């Protein structure tokens, strides 16, 4: 597994991916590593020890505060990881946004907060992608 982000060299937060979202995870992985700085996601080795126990405890502790805990936060993270290409990833992004919203996440509020967070330097322009997502999801 990649322990640090290849782009930012930051330690990755390990996130347990619920079974119904694994088709959207990198390589269908049951655990992903997410960079708290650029918000890229990477497949993680499920055999390694982890303190993640289902996504509802402190699993997101190393991530920006705008990322909610639980399955909705995982769906949001997986969607963020695909924002580099809305055209190519449109069906997956739509499904992930719907899953996040069904879990109670205000996706657009989270995007606004992430865009304003100075500790985040996302791999995609979040303010621009937010506007594009609004159009895409209408």
Image (cartoon, grey):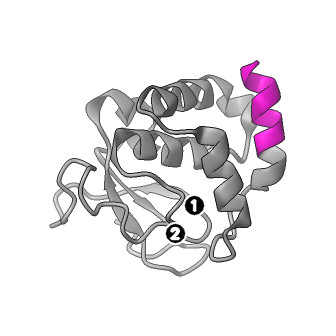
Is residue 88 in the magenta section? no
Is residue 135 in the magenta section? yes
Q: Which residue is mark 2?
A: 36
**Quadrant where the C terminus lies?**
top right
**Quadrant where the N terminus lies?**
bottom left
Q: Residue shown at 73%/41% (left/top)?
A: 85
Looking at the image, residue 21 sits to the left or right of residue 67; the answer is left
Dots 2, 1 in contact, CB < 8 A: yes
Please state the horizontal and vertical placement of residue 40, each as a whole percent of the image.
56, 59
Q: Main secondary structure of the magenta part?
A: helix
Please state the horizontal and vertical placement of residue 21, each as a whole percent of the image.
38, 32
The correct choice, above or below, for 12 with respect to 138 in the image is below
Q: Residue shown at 61%/73% (left/top)?
A: 7
Instruction: Report, in whole angstroms, how far the alpha carbon at label 2 lies from the one at label 1.
Output: 6 Å
Give the residues in magenta: 130-138
Q: Residue shown at 36%/68% (left/top)?
A: 61
Q: Which residue is mark 1?
A: 39
Looking at the image, residue 52 sits to the left or right of residue 23; the answer is left
């Amino acid at each position: 597994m990649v322990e640090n982000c290849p782009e930012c060299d930051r330690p990755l937060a390990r996130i347990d991916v619920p079974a119904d979202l694994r088709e959207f995870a990198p390589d269908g992985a049951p655990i992903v590593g997410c960079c708290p700085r650029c918000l890229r996601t990477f497949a993680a080795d499920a055999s390694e020890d982890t303190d993640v126990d289902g996504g509802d405890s402190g699993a997101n502790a190393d991530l920006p505060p705008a990322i909610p805990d639980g399955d909705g936060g995982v769906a949001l993270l997986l969607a963020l990881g695909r924002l580099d290409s809305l055209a190519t990833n449109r069906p997956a992004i739509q499904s992930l946004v719907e899953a996040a919203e069904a879990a109670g996440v205000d996706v657009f509020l989270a995007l606004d907060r992430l865009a304003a967070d100075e500790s985040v330097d996302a791999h995609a322009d979040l303010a621009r992608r937010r506007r594009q997502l609004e159009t895409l999801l209408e």
